[in-house]
Image (spheres, rainbow, N blue to C red):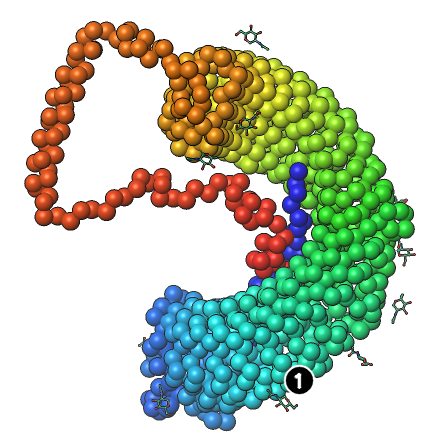
């Protein structure tokens, strides 16, 4: 099933990080316009002699020293910084109108500049604005910046700056914007920053800052935007933040903050975005939050230990667009008042303890039909029971994600589900839904993920599913589906996962579904009543990692084309009626980790190529009619990895298998022609002598050389990471990881 949380998590459209960048750039642009319009005359004073006239100005020298430290300028942005042009006309440089030779703005954002930031910048003492956003500066931030007492905007975000945040940033009590996010800054947030009383925006996100949020941050009385996300900040959120009465953005997601949210923080009426996802915060949300934070647009609390009910007053914060509170301990009902939020875009309450036993408990869903902009609704992994109201079909036609997995919902998929024509994610897995899968699902042609597994669906797989040509994942396992597998599924050219296991499907495996070009993660048809043979077309599944068709009634030979599935890692054909020998060509599937052929009707010897499959860790050949010698190398060395029970005519193998010795060993030798018996030993002896001889010669030649290090075979040098491991490691590409990458959430 698609037990993957985070139906897009709190991702909506733009990743938050790039939004921050855009914001910074936008501020830059606006200020630049203001400046350039007020400073236009500067350009007109430039004359032919200007260059020479200004040559010895300190700012001129400082700029040259700055340029000197740039080691790479891919766009030739600084090519205009030469002596034929007066420095006030250099790209990115703006000089003062009153003090003609003094630089007031240095604006060099997004130019791919690489190098260190010269301390000489501290000599541009008239500088109001320094913007180097989105380059590759990699030095420490020079202390000399502290000398720029007129500096209003210091924008160094999206670079590779290292070291600590200079504590002498008391410079310029004039500073309005301090943007240092997306660098590699370390150490603590210096307390001195909090004496910048005019500071309006402070961006420190995406660094590796440690320590606590300084209490004195409450002194930044002009602060409107505070971003601390993606750091290693610990401790509790200081009470004094509640003194920041004009705060609009508070972003502290993905840190290690503990304790409760200070109640004063819920009292800042200007607050628009409150995001503290992925911390260790606890406590309940004040019931009047929507009244005390009337401007709230984004509420992002994911991945903490918040508990108590979802306050109904959230509906009074009429501008709310995003309520993202998954992975907490919220309980009680989802308030039906939320339907009053006309601008609601995303409601994600995954992984909480929310309940809905009766019609009253489901009123919220009816009310949400009034939210015409709703795009994401995820109720995944709660305790929502009872009948899913039919009004679900009247949710916004803008809805893209509807994730109801892991609840106790019952009833049928309502008629009219095709109204939700923009859905790309529709998952009802792990509930108690009954009835047939409606044909009309085939009209949801934008679907990419359809999950109906682990319910009680009956009837046939609708042919119309073949119309969902954008589908990449289809989960129908663990239901009571009957009838044949529709060949129309062969139209799903983007499908990478198909799971139809544990149903009552019958008939043959249509060769169409074995020709699905994108099928790469897994194909699982196990635990059904499929019969006939496994079509040769199975060899077309060249990208497939897992094939499981166990526990069916398949017969015939194991097709040798399986060897064409060269990246297959897990192959389960057990509990069928396959006969014949184990095909030799299977040796081409070199990535095999698990091979289960048990409980079939296979005959012949155990092929020795199985010894050479380096990744093989589980081999089950039990309950067949295999005979002859059991190999001893490779997977066979470890008796716990091999199961060969119920094959009465096997012999040999490692002692742990407790098989009789093979009489066949001497039998084999006897059959060798006499000639070979003589020729091979002689040839061997001669070869040995030649080798020995060459070895001695070689040894003499190399005597003085140092021994070369022993290099392991190439394949051992790579840590093999299977696709399934990758999925597991990233938690199924779940919301937690998405959040960790900088979703809308932050
Ligand atoms: C100086 O820069 C200007 C503008 O980029 C260019 O036209 C000129 O050729 C440059 N002069 C020298 C000497 O590089
Ligand atoms: C900056 O000014 C200091 C003293 O004011 C001087 O020693 C230094 O050489 C100057 N550096 C540059 C690059 O102009
Ligand atoms: C914060 O401001 C208060 C007075 O408003 C002052 O007493 C205190 O020293 C300031 N703290 C810091 C760290 O500047
Ligand atoms: C919130 O502000 C109101 C008035 O602005 C005040 O009466 C109340 O005590 C404050 N609550 C908290 C928790 O600070
Ligand atoms: C919150 O909204 C409800 C419903 O519109 C309204 O009755 C109530 O007065 C509001 N509360 C406040 C404090 O504005
Ligand atoms: C939707 O909004 C209308 C108008 O405000 C209201 O009459 C109706 O009761 C709402 N529907 C639901 C299901 O809340
Ligand atoms: C859905 O909306 C339509 C039109 O507004 C209405 O006729 C129908 O009764 C609604 N269905 C449900 C189940 O609420
Ligand atoms: C959907 O599938 C059915 C059955 O396969 C087919 O008859 C119908 O034409 C398809 N509709 C569209 C829009 O492709
Ligand atoms: C297994 O194979 C033998 C012949 O090799 C055949 O007699 C027997 O019927 C087969 N059993 C099944 C269940 O197919
Ligand atoms: C095959 O053997 C392995 C290892 O002994 C075991 O884990 C697995 O369950 C067996 N498979 C079947 C179908 O019995
Ligand atoms: C044998 O295989 C088992 C299971 O894969 C493993 O735990 C064990 O370490 C292996 N023993 C040896 C000696 O490799």
Q: Toward which corner of the image does residue 81 lie, by quadrant?
A: bottom left
Q: Position of residue 464 (x, y in %)?
A: 72, 30
Give the residue at x 83% y 70%: 288
Q: Quadrant of the C terminus?
A: bottom right
Mark 1 neighbour class, 10 Å CA radius: few under 14, some 14 to 19, many 20 or more: many
The answer to whether one can see residue 730 in this image is yes
Q: Position of residue 698 (x, y in %)?
A: 10, 38
Give the residue at x 43% y 90%: 101
Q: Position of residue 526 (x, y in %)?
A: 62, 26
Give the residue at x 80% y 42%: 409
**Where's ligand 3: which quadrant?**
bottom right
Residue placed under numbered mark 1 in the picture? 221
Residue nearer the viewer, 90 or 215: 215
Give the residue at x 84% y 57%: 335
The total of numbered circles placed on residues is 1
**Left or right of 98 in this view: 425:** right
Q: Toward which corner of the image does residue 665 lie, by quadrant?
A: top left
Residue nearer the viewer, 272 or 26: 272
**Left or right of 582 in this view: 740:** right
Q: Quadrant of the N terminus?
A: top right
The answer to whether one can see residue 155 in this image is no
For ligand 3, tell me if the residue under mark 1 lies within 8 Å.
no
Image position of 463 with respect to 120: above or below: above
């Amino acid at each position: 099933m698609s037990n993957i949380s985070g139906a897009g998590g709190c991702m909506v459209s733009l990743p938050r990080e790039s939004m921050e960048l855009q914001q910074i750039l936008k501020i830059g642009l606006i200020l630049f316009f203001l400046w350039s319009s007020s400073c236009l005359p500067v350009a007109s004073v430039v004359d032919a002699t200007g260059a020479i006239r200004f040559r010895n100005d300190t700012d001129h020298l400082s700029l040259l020293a700055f340029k000197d430290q740039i080691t790479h300028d891919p766009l030739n942005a600084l090519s205009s910084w030469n002596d034929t042009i007066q420095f006030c006309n250099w790209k990115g440089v703006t000089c003062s109108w009153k003090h003609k030779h003094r630089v007031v703005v240095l604006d060099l954002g997004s130019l791919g500049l690489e190098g260190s930031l010269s301390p000489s910048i501290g000599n541009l003492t008239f500088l109001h604005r320094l913007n180097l956003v989105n380059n590759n500066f990699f030095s420490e931030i020079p202390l000399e910046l502290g000398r720029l007492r007129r500096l209003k905007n210091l924008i160094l975000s999206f670079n590779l700056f290292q070291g600590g945040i200079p504590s002498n940033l008391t410079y310029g009590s004039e500073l309005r914007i301090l943007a240092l996010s997306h660098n590699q800054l370390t150490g603590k947030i210096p307390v001195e920053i909090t004496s910048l009383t005019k500071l309006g925006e402070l961006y420190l996100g995406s660094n590796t800052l440690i320590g606590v949020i300084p209490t004195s941050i409450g002194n930044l009385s002009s602060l409107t935007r505070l971003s601390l996300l993606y750091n290693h900040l610990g401790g509790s959120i200081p009470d004094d933040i509640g003194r920041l009465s004009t705060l609009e953005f508070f972003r502290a997601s993905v840190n290690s903050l503990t304790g409760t949210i200070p109640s004063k923080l819920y009292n800042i009426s200007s607050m628009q975005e409150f995001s503290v996802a992925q911390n260790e915060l606890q406590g309940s949300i004040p019931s009047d939050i929507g009244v005390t934070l009337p401007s709230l647009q984004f509420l992002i609390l994911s991945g903490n230990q918040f508990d108590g009910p979802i306050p109904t007053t959230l509906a009074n914060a009429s501008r709310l667009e995003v309520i993202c509170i998954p992975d907490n301990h919220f309980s009680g009902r989802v308030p039906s008042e939320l339907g009053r939020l006309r601008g609601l875009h995303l409601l994600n309450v995954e992984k909480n303890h929310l309940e809905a036993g009766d019609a009253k408990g489901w009123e919220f869903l009816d009310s949400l039909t009034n939210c015409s902009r709703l795009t994401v609704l995820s109720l995944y992994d709660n305790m929502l029971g009872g009948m899913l109201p039919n009004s679900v079909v009247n949710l916004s036609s803008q809805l893209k994600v509807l994730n109801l997995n892991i609840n106790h919902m019952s009833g049928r998929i309502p008629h009219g589900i095709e109204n939700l024509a923009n859905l790309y994610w529709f998952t009802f897995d792990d509930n108690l839904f009954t009835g047939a899968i409606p044909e009309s699902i085939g009209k949801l042609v934008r679907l990419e993920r359809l999950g109906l597994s682990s319910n009680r669906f009956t009837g046939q797989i609708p042919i119309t599913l073949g119309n969902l040509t954008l589908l990449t994942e289809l989960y129908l396992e663990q239901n009571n589906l009957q009838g044949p597998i529709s060949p129309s599924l062969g139209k799903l050219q983007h499908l990478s996962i198909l799971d139809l296991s544990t149903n009552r499907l019958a008939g043959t495996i249509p060769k169409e579904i074995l020709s699905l070009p994108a099928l790469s993660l897994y194909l699982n048809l196990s635990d059904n009543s499929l019969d006939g043979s496994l079509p040769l077309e199975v060899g077309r599944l060249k990208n497939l990692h897992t094939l499981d068709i166990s526990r069916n009634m398949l017969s015939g030979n194991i097709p040798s084309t399986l060897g064409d599935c060269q990246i297959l890692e897990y192959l389960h054909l057990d509990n069928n009626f396959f006969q014949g020998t184990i095909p030799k060509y299977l040796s081409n599937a070199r990535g095999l980790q698990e091979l289960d052929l048990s409980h079939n009707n296979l005959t012949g010897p155990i092929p020795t190529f199985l010894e050479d499959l380096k990744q093989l860790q589980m081999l089950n050949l039990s309950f067949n009619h295999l005979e002859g010698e059991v190999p001893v190398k490779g997977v066979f060395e470890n008796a716990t990895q091999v199961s060969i029970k119920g094959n009465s005519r096997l012999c040999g193998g490692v002692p742990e298998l407790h098989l009789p010795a093979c009489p066949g060993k001497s039998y084999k030798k006897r059959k060798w022609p006499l000639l070979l018996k003589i020729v091979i030993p002689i040839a061997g002896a001669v070869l040995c002598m030649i080798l020995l001889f060459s070895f001695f010669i070689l040894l003499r030649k190399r005597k003085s050389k140092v021994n070369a290090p022993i290099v392991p075979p190439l394949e051992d040098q790579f840590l093999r990471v299977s696709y399934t491991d990758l999925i597991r490691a990233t938690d199924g590409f779940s919301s937690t990881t998405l959040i960790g990458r900088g979703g809308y959430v932050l």
